[in-house]
Image: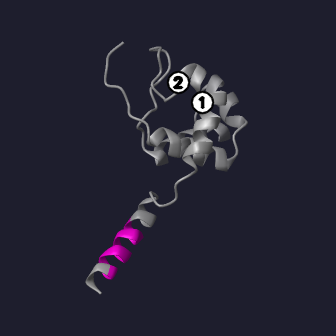
Amino acid sequence: MKNYVIAAMSGAVLLASGQGMAGDIEAGKKKAAEICAACHGADGNSPAPTFPRIAGQHASYIQKSLSEYKSGLRKDPIMAGMAATLSQEDIENLAAYYATQSGLQTKY
């Protein structure tokens, strides 16, 4: 019984934190290759200092950022155009994919 309670509480904490509502990583990987890789790199580790590295970011941060670019709350002409084409499902999938990638700690 004790193990059941611990498992149930852990699941509740994950759901409350948003970690339990993950997108489809494989779908995110495919979408990233189609529209994100040119600037942010195939795995989110941008090869150029002009574009941020997004690999390893929290999924909630990526979702919030993309949603704000899409709505116009966050301003960037390039990202606004890219985010405008994304559905909510695309945003969740991209966030799930990039959150699972390892960020590089090297300097340019």
Q: Tell me the residue that label 1 is attached to.
A: 75
Tell me the SS state at disc 2: helix
Please state which amino acid type lies under the numbered disc 2. Answer: His
Residue 10 forms part of the magenta stretch: yes
Residue under the point 53% across and 26% down: 42
Above or below, comparing residue 107 to residue 97 in the picture: above
Q: Would residue 58 be seen by someone viewing this image from the given angle?
A: yes
Give the CA distance from mark 1 to mark 2: 18 Å
Magenta highlight range: 4-13
Mark 1 or 2: in front is 2
Left/right placement of residue 26 relative to residue 4 reads right
* Among the 4 quarters of the image, the one containing residue 80: top right
* Among the 4 quarters of the image, the one containing residue 74: top right
Left/right placement of residue 46 relative to residue 8 reads right
Question: In the rendered view of the protein, which quadrant contains the N terminus?
Answer: bottom left
Question: In x, y percent, where is residue 31?
Answer: 64, 36
Residue 93 forms part of the magenta stretch: no
Above or below, comparing residue 62 to residue 105 in the picture: below
Please state which amino acid type lies under the numbered disc 1. Answer: Lys
Above or below, comparing residue 46 to residue 67 in the picture: above
* Among the 4 quarters of the image, the one containing residue 3: bottom left
Residue under the point 52% across and 59% down: 21
Question: In x, y percent, where is residue 107?
Answer: 32, 16
What label does residue 40 carry, if any? 2
Q: Residues within 10 Å of mark 1 (few under 14, many from 20)?
A: few
Left/right placement of residue 94 relative to residue 53 reads right
Determine the residue located farthest toward the left in the rendered image: 2
Q: Would residue 67 be seen by someone viewing this image from the given angle?
A: no
